[in-house]
Amino acid sequence: METRQAASAYRVRAERRRRSRGTGEARGDGWVRTEADERLLAAATRYGTLTLRQAATAFWNGREETARARVRLMTEAGLLNRSAEVRWAGTVVWTTERGARVAGVGLSAPHPPGERLLHRLALADVGLRLEAQGHAVLTEREVRTAEATPGRAAELLADLGVPVVHEGARGEPLLAVRAGVRAVHWPDLLLVLPGEGVAAVEVELTAKTESSLREILRAYGQARRRVLYLATGPVVRQLQGRPGPAGQWTDGVAQDVGLLPPGGPDPGTGGLLRVRPFAAIDPAVDRQAARHA
């Protein structure tokens, strides 16, 4: 009986908030939007999708019940979409159009994650961890939006403390890299290095074809863009090779294109490319990435 009454009270509150469409910032909304709420809305718009555990870790010091309560309020107010349909991920959230407007990050609401759920959550895990360490990070959504407006990419970098950037020929990307004659490769994330430039971060959970990977690596090499690959075991071996049966080293794609020295794994002594194993803070994302690989 108590459970049914609680469920009924929840539905009444949810319907009241949907009717009033309160955003938590005006008298009569029934709740007050906090700084942590706003940070969640911004991150859920920028990264596309977050797990409840990622949100709790990033914005509520790991307190999942607090995160759950705040997500419920924002869902009832029409700011967040919430789903628990994918069992391994648990509860995941992304912003509605209204939530994206309130977030104020200059992006529209993301599409529902669908088949891209694992990759989105892996990127969010990496990006939120870098931001927690004090780094400025641009997501692929932010990069694409900036590149779509002439001059905006240069302005964005200047705002972030990157030295004056001389834009290339008309139509040439500044944050992305040119891959071939017409194609553009969009990095998963860009790590902003104030006073220096930017470095790309690629999160690869499954192996690409060698021709595709070779084209991307050549694009980074030609652009002289530093890039960090965070990858599952099969992709790490594809990139930097592996020991052969007799102990000799079999080079990978990165050695083939000249981004790693031949005869061994990433030595970590400089150069444009770094290769590191992918590991997520959210255990569910970490386990699913290992299964996926």
Image (spheres, rainbow, N blue to C red):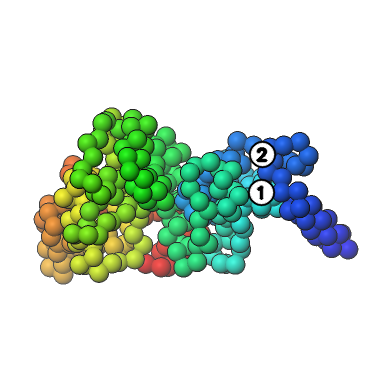
Hey, what amino acid is under mark 1? Answer: Met
**Above or below, comparing residue 87 to residue 70 in the picture:** below
Q: What residue is at 49 percent from the left and 42 percent from the top?
A: 105
Q: Is residue 217 visible?
A: no
Residue 142's x, y, as percent?
41, 47
Image marks 2 and 1: residues in contact by CB distance under 8 Å:
yes
The x, y position of residue 106, in whole percent, is: 48, 44
Q: Earlier in the sequence, mark 2 or mark 1?
A: 2
Mark 1 surroundings: few (<14), some (14-19) or many (≥20) residues within 10 A: many
| Spatial separation of the CA atoms under disc 2 and disc 1 | 9 Å
**Quick check: 38 above or below 48?**
above
Residue 259, image x, y percentages: 16, 52
What amino acid type is highlighted by mark number 2?
A: Arg
Residue at figure coordinates x 60%, y 36% from the top left:
35
Residue 195: percent from left, percent from top: 28, 29
Q: Which residue is mark 1?
A: 74
- Classify mark 1: helix, strand or loop: helix
Where, quadrant-wise, is the C terminus in this rendering?
bottom left
From the viewer's side, name the closer residue of 285 and 149.
149
Between 252 and 203, the residue placed more toward the observer is 203
* Picture residue at 79% right of the left edge, 52% below the top: 16
Q: Residue furthest right?
A: 1
Question: Which secondary structure, mark 2?
Answer: loop
Reading the image, the residue beneath label 2 is: 33
Viewer-closest of 3 and 209: 209
Q: Residue at x 70, y 53 (%)?
A: 76
**Against 244, is 120 above or below?**
above
- Can the viewer see residue 263 in this picture? yes
